[in-house]
Amino acid sequence: MPSLDLTASSIELTRALCDIESVSGNERALADAIEAALAGCAHLELVRDGDAIVARTNLGRSHRVVIAGHIDTVPVNGNLPTRFEGEDLVGRGTVDMKAGVAVQLKLAAELTEPTVDVTWIWYDHEEVAADLNGLGRLARNRPDLLTGDFAILGEPTNALVEGGCNGTLRVDVTTSGLRAHSARSWVGRNAIHGAAPILEILAAYTPREVEVDGLVYRESLNAVGISGGVAGNVIPDECTVAINYRFAPSSSGEQAIEHVRTLFADIPDSQFTVVDLAEGAWPGLDAPLAQEFLAAVGGTAMPKYGWTDVARFSALGIPAVNYGPGDPLLAHADDERVDTAQITECERGLRAWLTGP
Amino acid sequence: MPSLDLTASSIELTRALCDIESVSGNERALADAIEAALAGCAHLELVRDGDAIVARTNLGRSHRVVIAGHIDTVPVNGNLPTRFEGEDLVGRGTVDMKAGVAVQLKLAAELTEPTVDVTWIWYDHEEVAADLNGLGRLARNRPDLLTGDFAILGEPTNALVEGGCNGTLRVDVTTSGLRAHSARSWVGRNAIHGAAPILEILAAYTPREVEVDGLVYRESLNAVGISGGVAGNVIPDECTVAINYRFAPSSSGEQAIEHVRTLFADIPDSQFTVVDLAEGAWPGLDAPLAQEFLAAVGGTAMPKYGWTDVARFSALGIPAVNYGPGDPLLAHADDERVDTAQITECERGLRAWLTGP
């Protein structure tokens, strides 16, 4: 079994975590190594659920915070093992999100007496279908382990605090027509031509910018897929545009659906289908613990655009923010790479908050 | 080996031809049966080339006409063996185009002294890739067999004379963009949104109606396919619209390409690719033999919209028309069916012409 040295620097620890490949569904070896590395920490109560590890302090502090990160990655694409390039550590998982996990693991082992009680959670299956998500499974199996007054998710934020997250809605708008031979097209009705106004609306749409708790969330509305056509000599009778709407956390999922439905309500011979929906998360930066955290970390909070598991905490009524090393634009990229200075910075920020002023 | 009785009615013969399944590539048994059935006709010189059969009279007439039909069909879909439903014969091949072949075969055997010399051709592989086409193969292997002053193709025309055919051009217009995560869409450029003006142009396009030799050819321009999209959370960097242009035979293929290229010349970040092109065929109805044929058959000539092998004769400088039983809108349909009255009518028309006034 590969072993982890939690006394190494958080940069070295990031590298070790990445080099234990853990594409979603294959987290066992890494979860075993984490469990073994923490086994000697007398100040932590360990719970294992599948390939999720929960490590809790029980110091009787007046507040408890949850600090979490997922240990799985998207598939490797010739980008493991990791390597250094100047100040960057390059390879799968360096950004999303083993650098964040490394900082958390190091501090979990080292800080025997944090100023708040901490529930550290490292979990599996974040990069795949939502029903497999390890944090969701924990919430179902052991809801008691997720309780807390504030939560921090170590997703990449360029070492800035990013509050809440946009919600995400996927819908299909499908036009229907009448099939015919393309040599006698006037006998049919072309469903792809019928989709023209859908694309016009999307191309002309100006996304909103919505202020929530002092953060400005930028929305977006995009076709993410289009398909139609039967054969090279057939007038197509169906065309489907797949649309993704990222909406500010001040809108509910229902409101988001209504917004998009209204946009396409007048497309002739069309059908509107909701494919999936994930509510956004309020930034929750008005919570006192969040204010203290912000002060300790320094800098200004930013909105999070991508949907993250902070929404799971938000749904449980726990204010939650994202805070981790790495540029989110490089997540999932083949040249995924983390600026190691951000790893050190996040370690400093979290340590400053957990050890108090 | 199945045998064919060429003294049966052309309706019964249609049924027998259909019930010998001959999906493209599997024409051997039917070609063998046709060859065997004609072997006893002393007035016909038989030539076999692959699964094509050529049967020629050599009466020293002042004119020679080519009368041709393909013996293959598109795939069977639970619609064989044939059955009668009222006046209809139902099943694969009844329209496209064994009813036409039946009329031709019956007259080939029966008319020992037609008023013109006739080159009867029944050929393979019409319903598949153009380079496999049996008539094209004959034109390469034995160009002497295709010479003539006039040609008649027995493709379904509802027993009317349809002159020439529209040409057909397929192009792809592809827009390109820049991939990005859909949560931060402003980092990318959406290629599907970029395709909006392509669909607008297609939806707004008014096809021309072009008079050629007194026949009005209706053109059409249609998207026959569209595809784009990478994943539900990715701004797509490519979208391709597949377009089919059916153009009047007075336009050359080059002119057709220029017409379509010009329509889409101003689409930003787009590429225009010609996928395939088949020239149209002039109706050739001003030829004296064509006039005589029209007079004998009766009725008014119509334009042919779908591309057919008449274009191969047209390319050889031989005026050619389509004339056969069956509704072309039912060709390739699962409920393919021919009105048997049209079979009888085509037999009458062809016989009237070939036996003279």
Image: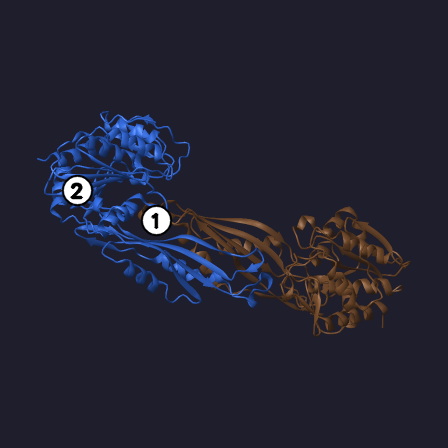
Chain colours: A brown, B blue
Q: Alpha-carbon distance for marks 1 and 2?
A: 25 Å
Eyeballing the image, is B244 above or below A187?
Answer: below
Eyeballing the image, is A161 above or below A194?
Answer: below
Give yes or no for contact between labels 1 and 2 (Cβ–Cβ under 8 Å). no
Label 1 sits on residue? B131
A16 sits left or right of B287 in the view: right
Under circle 1, the secondary element is helix
Under circle 2, the secondary element is strand
Tell me, for residue B301, which label it has, or none.
none
Chain of the residue that carries numbered disc 2 in the rendered image? B
Chain of the residue that carries numbered disc 1 in the rendered image? B
A285, B105: nearer the viewer = B105
Q: Can residue B35 be seen in this snapshot?
A: yes
**Which residue is pictured at 26% across the width and 49% down the height?**
B312
Q: Quadrant of residue A79?
A: bottom right
> How many numbered marks, from 0 up?
2
Estimate the x, y position of residue B244 in percent, counting from the top left.
35, 53
Estimate the x, y position of residue A316 in percent, counting from the top left.
74, 54
Tell me, for residue B65, which label it has, or none.
2
Q: Quadrant of residue A118?
A: bottom right
A139 sits left or right of B109 in the view: right
